[in-house]
Amino acid sequence: MAETLDHIGRLIEQGGAHQICTVNPEFIMAAQKDLVFRQILRESALNVPDGVGVLWAARRLGRPLRERVAGSDLIGEIADRAARTGWKLFLLGAAEGVADRAAAVLRARHPAIDIVGTFAGRAGPEGDDESVTRIRAAAPDVVLVAYGAPKQNKWIERNLARTGAAVGIGVGGAFDFIVGAQRRAPRWMQRAGLEWLYRLAREPWRWRRQLALPLFVWRVVTESKRDAGTAG
């Protein structure tokens, strides 16, 4: 996590417009069909593994990664670092009022934090201009976007350079977790890689999205066997 935060700091100092993606198996499978999303992941400034499935796949394919960087955890770490370094944050997305409440919670936890604005906005292009205008006026260093993937990533790709912010990060349901609108899995389930099962039990409508997981496992196993055969 510290390496990710250090990298964010370097990107802020560097300037420009940089997207950071927290990648889980659903991202990877969606990118097989969504060519725009695939290109975003390929061109992002940094992709971090959000989920034990990605860590397992990396080990299986002989390219192990150091640790999981869950988007829901990352926002808390960013808030802590921002309070100590002066990074300016803007919270975009989620349902009406949720970003405001999330900002209030983060300010209570980190009194020195500089959250320069919040806005629910809209994920589609029809809402881009209003969101960009608000963000430019606030002049943040980092925009945290909570529209869910791939909408949030496409929003960042379309608009980050227009906002003047250096870093854009899609954070999914992180604002909802912060305000308690959704509960995260117990720590032991997170450590065991079972957070997906907890969310499925609480939100059965997610079952279609979870179909990506066995397909992801099958794809990784198939590719690792092919690589082993080539090496042999």
Image (cartoon, rainbow, N blue to C red):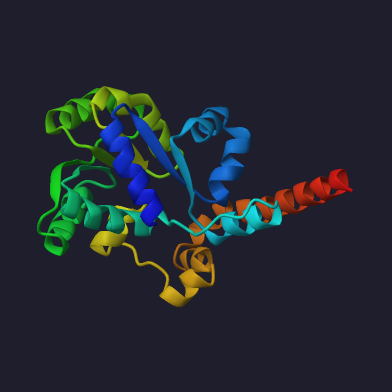
Q: Is residue 8 left or right of residue 48?
A: left
State the residue at coordinates (23%, 57%).
80
Q: In this view of the protein, which residue sits in the foreground, 143 or 181?
A: 143
Above or below, 183 relative to 54: below
Can I make out residue 145 in this image?
no
**Residue visible at 37% across and 25% down in the picture:** 158
Position of 140 relative to 189 (above/below): above
Q: Position of residue 121 (x, y in %)?
A: 24, 36
**In the rendering, at what x and y percent does residue 84 appear?**
17, 54
Of residue 114 and residue 26, the one placed in the foreground of this image is 114
Q: Position of residue 19 (x, y in %)?
A: 39, 35
Rendered residue at 14%/52% (across/down): 113
Quadrant of the image for the N terminus? bottom left
Let me know if residue 45 appears in the view: yes
Rendered position, 144 above or below 124: below
| Quarter location, residue 151 | top left
- Please name the residue shown 48% across and 59% down the image: 68
Furthest residue in direction bottom, as rendered: 188
Q: Give coordinates of residue 83: x percent, y percent.
A: 17, 54
* Front position in the image: 158 or 74: 74
